[in-house]
Image (cartoon, grey):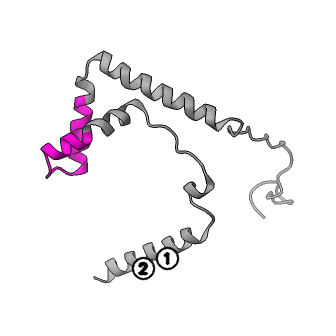
Amino acid sequence: MAKSNRCLKRSAKSHRRRKHFGKTRKQRGRKRRPLPAFFLFMKDRRSKLKCDNPNWNVIQMAKRLGTMWHQQPHNDKENYKRKAAQLWQSYSRSKGCRTKRKRKKRKLGRRRCRNPKTGRGRL
């Protein structure tokens, strides 16, 4: 009992901490990255599979959807891949100049954390 209370307290603290920092993704106006082809397939098929098998947990659903994806004909997979590529194109166009910038390489020089007497290790 005490362990579960501790976990609850920890999760509540972390939630408060996260809530305190800045804005959410929606408030910042950022878009989510588009889904890959398999996830689009799962999105289409999950509701029907859930209706047919209401007692299944998430793991059983994922396994079944994976086997269904592997059994799909090549043409059907290509349709989902094409759709995913279109979503990715529209995402990258809307993203515009906000692409990842390359980080500057650090100059290789004398490191400050070395011991001046021995020349190695920390102070």
Count of marks placed on residues: 2
Q: Is 55 inside the magenta-drawn segment?
A: yes
Please give the residue where the numbered disc 2 appears in the rendered image. 9
- Number of residues whose C-alpha sits closer than 10 Å to that of mark 2, classed few (under 14), some (14–19) or many (20 or more): few
Q: Amino acid at mark 2?
A: Lys
Residue depicted at x 56% and y 55%: 25
Secondary structure type for disc 1: helix
Q: Is 112 inside the magenta-drawn segment?
A: no
Q: Are marks 1 and 2 in contact (CB under 8 Å)?
A: yes
Residue 63 or residue 26, whichever sits in front: 26
Disc 1 versus disc 2: distance between alpha carbons? 6 Å
Q: Is residue 27 left or right of residue 8?
A: right
Q: Quadrant of residue 77?
A: top left
Q: Quadrant of residue 75?
A: top left
Magenta part of the protein: which range? 46-68
Q: Position of residue 12 (x, y in %)?
A: 45, 76
Against 87, is 58 above or below? below
